Image: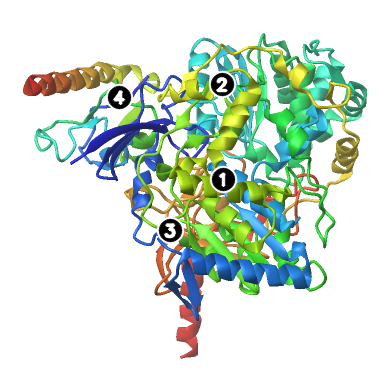
Amino acid sequence: MSEKIVYSHCHYCVSLCGTKITVENNRVKNIEPDRENPMTWKDFCRKGKTAAEVVEHPQRIRTPMKRVGDRYVEASYEEAISDIASRLTAIIEQHGNDAVGTYHGNPLGFDFGGSLFFNGLLDALGTGNRFWVGSVDQNNTHIVQHAMYGSELISLPADIDECQFFLLLGMDPVQSKFGWLEVNPDGWNRVLAQQAKGAKIVVVDPRYSETAKSADDYIAIQPGQDWALVLGLLHVIFSENLQRESQTPLSGIEPIRDAALAANLGELADRCGVGAETIRKLARAFAQADTAMAIAHTGVGHNPNGTIGEWLVTVLNAVTNRLDTPGGRRLERSYLDLVKIFSSFAPPSSHRTRLKNLPAIAGFHALAELSDEILTPGQGQIRAMIIANGNPVISGPDSATLDKALGSLDLLVAVDLVQRDSHRHADWLIPGTHFLEREGLHCLFAGLMDKPFAQYANKAVDAPAGIMPEWQFYMELALAMGRPMFGKKGANSIIKASKFLAKITAKPNLQLNPQWLERILVASGKRIKYKDIRKHPHGWIFAEKSYGDLAKTLRTPDKTVHCSPPSFMAALQDALIDSRPVTSPDFPLIMVNKRQRESMNSWLNETQGMHSLNRGNTVDIHPDDAEALGLIDGQQVRISSPQGSISLPVLITAGGMPGVIAVGHGWGSTVYEPNSGKIAQRYGSNRNALVDRHAIDRFSQVPHFNSTAVRVEPIAAETEQASLIAAAQA
Amino acid sequence: MTYVIVGHCINDTACVDVCPVDCIHPSPSEPGFKTADMLYIDPDVCVDCNACAEACPIDAIMPARKLPDNLRHYQAINAELAQGRSHRLKESAA
């Protein structure tokens, strides 16, 4: 019996909790938070605790599986790589590079080596038809960062411990733990600690969330109208001269100042459903607080004007000196200059989509467009897809249409731990590795930390025999196709030489692998040494946090923060005159999202340990609406939109906006048993099936997950009526 | 900070099942479960994740900071029970 303790960190969400893992005979016996981790462990949750259940998942794909009829049979990697390579090559030769599409989900983002080599394969394929999960998540922040800071990768984590005034819009940190494009371990408890010392918390949300219950002020707002509230705040700040001189250089304040002053506060108040006097008071309190931050998450982003909302929130921070100042939104320069590296080596994609001519964001297109790009015939139509660690049918809008599209492909390759909804039509299922089976330094997270921190994730267990790491599969596929990995001529020769060297010296690490790149990236930062990171198994806070690096990091030509990007200004004018309601007589309610901790990143939401008790998928309804519809708690209802219907039990929830229902995402996904084709697991209903794929934010291309017009009807009553009719007819 | 179990606890084990750090005692597998008046949370181990409060069918768990005055003494009761357990564990290990 060999028992060992491994120190690592969790890879489910950006809390990245330090973990202490007890392993016996290559099996995980226990996972607990690593209390010696100096940065992060206090957000440790049930999902991290039960992570090993997925390693031993009964439906886990343990070998490449080839589709034969409607079943799958085991195959070797040689056969898989050879068959996929020849079919991709034939498709590309006949229809061009863009005929191969790709999608990747969140788990790939948590696998640094896998991400690097997947992108290397995409460059080898030369396709521009790359789609990703960011387009149903955080794309609006990338757009705003690019327009205002000059780079899609400049993210400013919240400086919680110095903040005296938290303006939280469309976020529920009790559930999310404050993480999104920032790593703020124990973030919510730190906000509460600040509150205990006198800081104010204002929560803006259509839903009376757990977070709202702890706020000093809760402001119920109409879904999707956050931008109008924030414009109102700017109106008051500029009218009453409440701006503060910014320590980060700003430019172009005049146009947004003029627009804010020209806007009518009463009209903005009507639009967002928040009283003008409340807006005035909030603007004064925010601007006059010694330190403050405004921060918007998906509740703001997943709406028709989600990018405008994020932009105006950033302007609010900018004109009140909350950018890169204590208690505001701080830039962490960390141990490597990611912005510079990516600006030099990976220039933004110039590819545009065939049908809507839309640009890529942070290198990738929007999931909302994928179905049409597959289903619409013509030059450049997608005929093959590689899906890496993703389940876009569930994560994206209009699930039924995407399922149909994926079923129409000539070739579908899915890489994952289990077979999910989006892999139902796959020709090949390729095994994935679990994060407990991998090791590495995730360099992309470096700049998202709220302190200068680095941790190398150690491997807890070996993957089942015969499973090839994903990065290696992508590399072997490029080699088999004879296409240059990373799109660089000569790369394949280097890879082959390194493989040869590794073989003759019997040192596998001499073969090109992700660790080579991690080492190069850390060395390029000239701040800390890779080997010193490895000497800190619990993680390493390697410096004190500092302020003022944003000014040096800006990639705008004039090195200022651009406050009035022309495209945003034009969109704002459109938004101000657009008064079309989202709802209609047929679909009179607005459905918003609801964060639930374990389904925040919805992958691997379906392990048994997650369903022990008390995790439910409900529709939260305001008491007024429930009364009007004659609904009671627990009653099953049908929720319909023009895209389809789902059914869920009612949970009557007081305190928020009437006319708004909330349904959490990450439910209704399926795990299949590949040998039999049977459904092994499914919990709850997928609310994204109701979302229109054609209605998107014009900048971020994110669908309106938080402004979906729906109708709610009791199912029982209808069934009763049907049986009465049947009885009358009999 | 910690979460605290208060007196109307009915020894339902929903909280024990969902706790990610196993800080709620006694669990059904531990001695004393059948005779315990109430369960308690070890404040040194609790990570404030709120899972137990969500799971509790009768709202008998709350964060220490939200304890009303008439229930405030339960914070000390939970801590003392947890200390007693640690003490017993140390003694039996010695």
Disc nearest the viewer among 1 and 4: 1
Q: Check contact, mark 1 vs mark 4: CB within 8 A.
A: no
Q: Name the residue tied to disc 1.
A: A498
Between A267 and A53, the one nearer to me in the picture:
A53
Q: Earlier in the sequence, mark 3 or mark 2?
A: 2
Q: How far, Cα to Cα, is label 1 from label 4? A: 48 Å
* A262 left or right, relative to A63: right
Q: Name the residue tied to disc 2.
A: A216
Q: Is residue A629 visible?
A: yes
* A384 left or right, relative to A43: right
Disc nearest the viewer among 2 and 1: 1
Circle 2: residue type? Asp
Between A517 and B7, the one nearer to me in the picture:
A517
- Asked if badge 1 and badge 4 are on a common chain, one would say no
Q: Judging from the image, what secondary structure is the residue with disc 4 in?
A: loop
Q: Which mark is residue B45?
A: 4
Q: Which mark is residue A702?
A: none
Disc nearest the viewer among 3 and 2: 3
Q: Judging from the image, what secondary structure is the residue with disc 3 in?
A: loop
Q: Name the residue tied to disc 3.
A: A683
| Mark 3 belongs to chain | A
- Asked if badge 4 and badge 2 are on a common chain, one would say no
Percent of width and height locating residue A537: 40, 25
Q: Judging from the image, what secondary structure is the residue with disc 1 in?
A: helix
